[in-house]
Image (cartoon, rainbow, N blue to C red):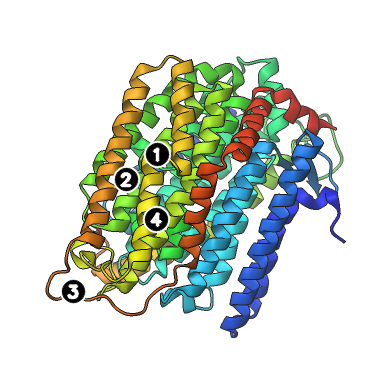
């Protein structure tokens, strides 16, 4: 099970990194959001596999899963929400000014 | 009311409360100004009190937020290094607010400017005082958002573009930092810096530790614009509004440098012999790249942004060597550079505000300085500070770095430092001559009004004072470096 999750998280990372490096700004921002999601899943997987019972639910049978990574994830999700909002707002302003979503066109700042 | 034990958290809470109050009083700009000045003054007073208290206690001051004890609670640790950096940033931030109050930028009049500025102050101070890596991440994000939005609302028409580019890179840095946090949690089971230091020192060969170290290094490199990851920096620091740009280029970049200090001296002490040479190499590359890049610019603020690249390279060279003298040199250099760079950027904004078109491009500001001799004198002293010429404080920082280079027997670094000093003289003096000595071209006149000079004048005065009476700062920095050489001091303070 860990192997499958690891492969899935790796694929999400790969997709996110690929998207970040694209020329179209919208796809790049989507890639950023995928990357933050992948990191969130990674954080989840740090606390999910050495234990027998889920973190907050039900009576304990064996070892209870670590709840701290889930607290970290909640904070990270909220922060990435704010970051996604600001990134999309900036993307929208830039696209409106340059009339294209092509990052190669953002050439206003030269030496 | 204000208890001694709350001191580590006061420099964070005061600007935050100021920001929230200023946001609530959005409809009253004069109240916002008063609140911003009051909050930053109070934060400066608190940070000075913190520094005095930490020195008196001879141990780091620790505050557990909410009363929850480590490792589950949020720890704020005021080491001597942190306290010194916090004092440095509060001084520069307060003078940044003073400059903003006296400036004629349109963006300063927006109802969210002062709240965002105070949030930037909160994020920066929290980053220096964080005792927990995840808390550092949260404060870094606050800092990133505040500085991004402040640049996006800049009067400069390319502010939005520069903000977008910076934000993208900053998000990537955040992703890397989160990955590092996950890796550290898996391998060490704790996230407080003291806990990490203890666990890593007990067993330096844990799985995922090299990965975490590499990711942390990459994240801090992006944040402090170290050589290969610096490409966002010239655009961002140029397009930001002048008071914000003065903050970004002087104190915000020091947060990454502070992170490197903690990495080398607290967290990864056993791996420091690998990280150190990397930092030194990147620092030297940054010094040369920044110096040469500054010579090739056509815009005053851009030139100063490239100059920041070079000066941050100096600090990294000191951090990379790792000896107590080199660390003290790095701290003194960072402190002095913040003051000098903030002054220079404010002066460049002043010159741009007096030019007929509000721009810092050289062809627009040539000859603008003729009727402004006081600003010229300030700029000249600031340029001396950047180049490291006595009696300015830049000389003290460079001298300490020279001595630590001699002590560590690094000849190439000495050559690089010397070359960088010459380069910085070249570009600053060229700018000075173009603005203050050359006659203005035909269509260029100096406006009779513009930004006020109180803030840069105070900063330059501090530059000269710290250049002449430098012993207190050097003594505190030396003590801070000694504390950093003994991680048990930090760990012991948090543990109890």
Check if mark 3's residue and mark 4's residue have beta carbons within 8 Å: no
Residues marked 1 and 4, same chain: yes
Q: Residue at x 70, y 62 (%)?
A: B42
The residues bearing labels 3 and 4 have C-alpha atoms spaced at a distance of 22 Å
Q: Callout 3: 10 Å neighbours few (<14), some, many (20+)?
A: some
- SS of the residue under disc 2: loop
| Pointer 3 residue | B444
Q: Callout 2: 10 Å neighbours few (<14), some, many (20+)?
A: some
Residues marked 3 and 4, same chain: yes
N-terminal-most mark, 3 or 4: 4
The residues bearing labels 2 and 1 have C-alpha atoms spaced at a distance of 41 Å
- Camera-side residue: B420 or B391? B391
| Pointer 1 residue | B388
- Camera-side residue: B180 or B304? B304
The residues bearing labels 2 and 3 have C-alpha atoms spaced at a distance of 43 Å
Left/right placement of residue B16 relative to residue B53 reads left
Q: Is residue B371 above or below residue B77?
A: below
Left/right placement of residue B137 relative to residue B422 reads right
| Pointer 4 residue | B344
Question: Where is the C terminus of chain B found, in terms of image quarters?
Answer: top right
The answer to whether residue A54 shows anywhere in this view is no
């Amino acid at each position: 099970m860990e192997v499958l999750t690891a492969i899935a998280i790796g694929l999400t990372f790969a997709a996110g990194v690929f998207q970040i490096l694209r020329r179209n700004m919208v796809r790049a921002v989507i890639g950023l959001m995928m990357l933050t999601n992948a990191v969130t899943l990674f954080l989840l997987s740090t606390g999910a596999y050495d234990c027998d019972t889920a973190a907050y639910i039900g009576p304990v049978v064996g070892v209870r899963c670590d709840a701290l990574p889930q607290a970290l994830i909640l904070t990270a999700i909220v922060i990435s929400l704010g970051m996604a909002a600001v990134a999309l707002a900036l993307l929208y302003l830039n696209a409106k000014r340059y009339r294209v979503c092509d990052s190669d066109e953002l050439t206003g700042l030269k030496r | 009311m204000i208890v001694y034990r709350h001191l580590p958290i006061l420099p964070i809470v005061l600007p935050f409360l100021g920001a929230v109050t200023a946001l609530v009083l959005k409809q009253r700009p004069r109240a916002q100004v008063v609140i911003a000045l009051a909050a930053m003054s109070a934060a400066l007073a608190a940070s000075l009190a913190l520094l005095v208290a930490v020195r008196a206690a001879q141990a780091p001051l620790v505050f557990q937020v909410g009363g929850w004890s480590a490792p589950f609670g949020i720890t704020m640790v005021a080491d001597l290094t942190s306290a010194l950096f916090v004092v440095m940033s509060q001084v520069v931030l307060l003078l940044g607010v003073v400059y903003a109050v006296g400036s004629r930028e349109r963006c300063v009049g927006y109802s969210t400017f002062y709240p965002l500025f105070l949030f930037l102050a909160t994020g920066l101070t929290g980053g220096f005082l964080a005792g927990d890596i995840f808390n550092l991440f949260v404060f870094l994000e606050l800092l990133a958002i505040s500085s991004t939005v402040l640049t996006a609302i800049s009067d400069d028409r390319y502010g939005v573009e520069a903000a977008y580019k910076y934000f993208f890179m900053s998000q990537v840095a955040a992703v890397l930092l989160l990955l590092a946090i996950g890796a550290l949690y898996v391998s060490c089971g704790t996230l407080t810096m003291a806990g990490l230091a203890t666990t890593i020192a007990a067993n330096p060969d844990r799985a995922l530790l090299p990965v975490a170290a590499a990711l942390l290094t990459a994240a801090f490199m992006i944040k402090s614009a170290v050589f290969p990851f610096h490409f966002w920096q010239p655009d961002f620091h140029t397009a930001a509004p002048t008071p914000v740009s003065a903050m970004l280029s002087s104190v915000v970049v020091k947060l990454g440098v502070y992170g490197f200090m903690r990495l080398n001296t607290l967290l990864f002490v056993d791996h420091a012999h690998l990280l150190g040479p990397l930092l030194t190499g990147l620092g030297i590359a940054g010094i040369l790249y920044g110096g040469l890049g500054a010579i090739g610019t056509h815009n005053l603020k851009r030139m100063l942004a490239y100059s920041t690249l070079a000066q941050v390279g100096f600090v990294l060279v000191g951090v990379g060597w790792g000896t107590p003298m080199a660390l003290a040199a790095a701290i003194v250099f960072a402190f002095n550079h913040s003051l000098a760079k903030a002054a220079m950027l404010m002066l460049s904004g002043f010159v741009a505000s007096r030019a007929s078109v509000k721009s810092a491009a050289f062809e627009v500001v040539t000859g603008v300085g003729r009727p402004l001799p006081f600003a010229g004198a300030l700029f000249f002293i600031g340029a001396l500070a950047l180049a490291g010429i006595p009696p300015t404080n830049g000389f003290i920082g460079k001298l300490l770095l020279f001595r630590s280079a001699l002590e560590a027997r690094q000849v190439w670094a000495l050559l690089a430092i010397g070359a960088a000093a010459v380069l910085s003289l070249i570009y600053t003096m060229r700018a000075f001559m173009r603005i203050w000595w050359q006659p203005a071209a035909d269509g260029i006149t100096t406006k009779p009004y513009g930004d006020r000079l109180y803030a840069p004048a105070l900063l330059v005065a501090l530059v000269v004072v710290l250049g002449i009476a430098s012993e207190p700062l050097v003594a505190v920095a030396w003590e801070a470096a000694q504390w950093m050489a003994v991680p048990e001091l930090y760990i012991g303070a948090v543990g109890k």
